[in-house]
């Protein structure tokens, strides 16, 4: 049976939405898109495998729709679920807070019992600080995308990341 993956995202200026659409197009039969601004987060309960997309806003803050559903998310039981994260940020403009929201989301879903899969190397990025790093500082907790400064890297990053996510979901 084909994998069924819930992809939940929210997007203020459309970048994260565009990436969500791109991921869905790469795996047309598997991905079910959910815009949190419209649907909230409750449907996460229906999937064993989740991809979550979040941009960072306002100097290290959650994007507004994620913020609105943050408490609801903390009340979900995500135990037994595998979660892959992707974040949107701007390393040149906001290098002291690069991808912070992805780090906050990682904490939140792990607190809710989920297993977060596929860390992503920091090689190829330039930033001062991020809350989205693993303890050793060598990886982001999910795929870091920068449509403001590194749009040209996105396609290749997705091509490398998505197969790793599928393997981790199928393992
Ligand atoms: C006012 C403002 C604040 C931002 N703050 C951050 C930030 O703290 N950290 C970061 O990595 N990116 C930051 N960004 C960059 C956004 O995350 C980036 O543009 C992203 O692609 C927006 O995604 P969206 O269109 O899905 O909302 C900020 C952008 C703006 C305009």
Image (cartoon, rainbow, N blue to C red):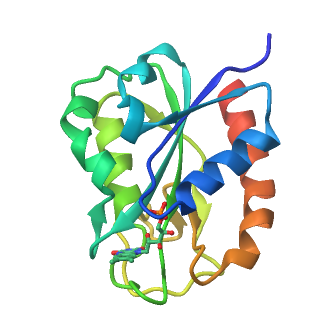
Quadrant for residue 78, please give it: top left
Q: Is residue 151 visible?
A: yes
- Horizontal side of 107 relative to 44 (left or right) equals left
Q: Residue at x 60, y 84 (%)?
A: 149
In percent of width and height, residue 42 lies at 36, 22
Q: Residue at x 58, y 81 (%)?
A: 125
In percent of width and height, residue 163 lies at 78, 44
In percent of width and height, residue 119 lies at 57, 54
Most extreme residue toward the left is: 71
In the rendered view, would you say 32 is above or below 141?
A: above
Quarter that holds the C terminus: top right
Total numbered labels placed on residues in the image: 0
In the rendered view, would you say 109 is above or below 144?
A: above
For this rendering, which residue is in front, 120 or 155? 155
In the rendered view, would you say 16 is above or below 45?
A: below
Q: Residue at x 78, y 64 (%)?
A: 155
- Horizontal side of 163 relative to 16 (left or right) equals right
For this rendering, which residue is in front, 158 or 15? 15
- Horizontal side of 14 relative to 150 (left or right) equals left
Most extreme residue toward the top is: 1
Quarter that holds the N terminus: top right
In percent of width and height, residue 11 lies at 45, 55
Q: Residue at x 54, y 57 (%)?
A: 16
Ligand 1 placement by image quarter = bottom left
- Horizontal side of 122 relative to 45 (left or right) equals right
In the rendered view, would you say 75 is above or below 145?
A: above
Quadrant for residue 43, please give it: top left
């Amino acid at each position: 049976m084909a994998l069924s993956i819930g992809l939940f995202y929210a997007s203020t200026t459309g970048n994260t939405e565009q990436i969500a659409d791109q991921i869905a197009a790469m795996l047309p039969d598997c991905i079910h898109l959910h815009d949190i601004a419209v649907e909230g987060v409750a449907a996460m309960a229906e999937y064993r495998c989740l991809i979550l997309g979040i941009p960072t806003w306002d100097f290290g803050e959650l994007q507004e729709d994620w913020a609105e559903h943050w408490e609801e998310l903390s009340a979900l039981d995500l135990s037994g679920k595998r979660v892959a994260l992707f974040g949107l940020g701007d390393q040149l403009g906001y290098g002291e807070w690069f991808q912070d929201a992805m780090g906050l989301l990682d904490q939140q879903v792990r607190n809710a019992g989920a297993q977060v899969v596929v860390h992503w190397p920091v090689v190829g990025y330039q930033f001062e600080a991020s809350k989205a790093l693993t303890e050793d500082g060598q990886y982001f907790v999910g795929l870091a995308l920068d449509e403001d400064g590194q749009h040209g890297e996105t396609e290749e990053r997705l091509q490398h990341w998505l197969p790793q996510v599928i393997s981790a979901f199928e393992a």
